[in-house]
Each structure stands twice: as structure tokens, then as C-alpha cells.
Image (tube, rainbow, N blue to C red):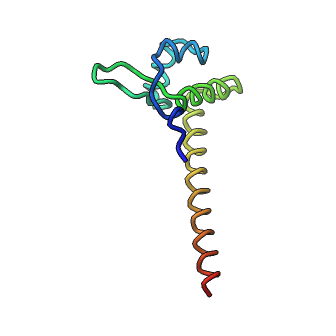
Amino acid sequence: MVDLAASRALYSISVTSELTGVNPPMLRLYEQKGLLTPYRTEGGTRRYSGHDVDRVTEITALLTAGLNLAGIEQVLHLRAENQRLRRELAELRKAARTRSSRD
């Protein structure tokens, strides 16, 4: 089930900055580096979702742990790949259970 409140782009850059403690220039840098992809309105204004706020919090934690932005990019990529593979494995296991119950 999708959490619509978390996926809706509701927050301006200033609100996101307040929520995360990360200043707007850094939020722009995260976007430039591909770590964050806020929604853009027709006028080009950035709008951040709850997922984006969580992502900024995750980036901040990784920076605090000593990683640089390139390292954070790799960690986030590997985490996403891990989640994809876990979903795929769960689907395969479900299909195998379905097949074995029919036999």
C-alpha cells in the first residue's frame, strides 16, 4: 500500500530546510548530485515529499558517519538495488509456493 501523504510533494525548499536542518543551498547540491529529486511545478519551484524529507535525513546521517557525497550516492544506490532484489525474491518465493501447492 502506498502512503499518499509521504509521496505527495507538499513542502517548499524553506519548509524542507526547517524540517531537516539542512540549508537550501545544500538541498540544491543534493539535487545537483542526483541524491534527491524533488518535484518541480510548472513554474520550476521545487516541492519536496515526505519521502524526500526522509532521504535528506538519511543523507545527513551518512554525512555524520563520515561518508562523502560520492560514497552516499553508492550507499543509496546499493540500498535501492537491495530492496529491488528483496521484492523480486519475495515474488519468486510466492510463485514457488503457489506452484508447489498445486502439485
In front of the other: 72 or 102: 102
Q: Which percent across, then down, holds residue 65? A: 71, 27
Residue depicted at 58% across the width and 57% down the height: 87
Q: Is residue 48 above or below residue 77?
A: above
**Residue at the extreme right:** 65
In front of the other: 17 or 73: 17
Residue depicted at 49% across the width and 24% down the height: 30
Q: Which percent across, then down, holds residue 74? A: 57, 39
Q: Is residue 17 above or below residue 42?
A: above
- Count of number-bearing discs: 0
- Left or right: residue 28 compared with residue 95: left
Question: What is the quadrant of residue 92 in the picture?
Answer: bottom right
Q: Which percent across, then down, holds residue 66? A: 69, 26
Q: Which percent across, then down, holds residue 76? A: 57, 38
Residue depicted at 54% across the width and 39% down the height: 3
Question: What is the quadrant of residue 103 in the picture?
Answer: bottom right
Residue depicted at 60% across the width and 63% down the height: 89
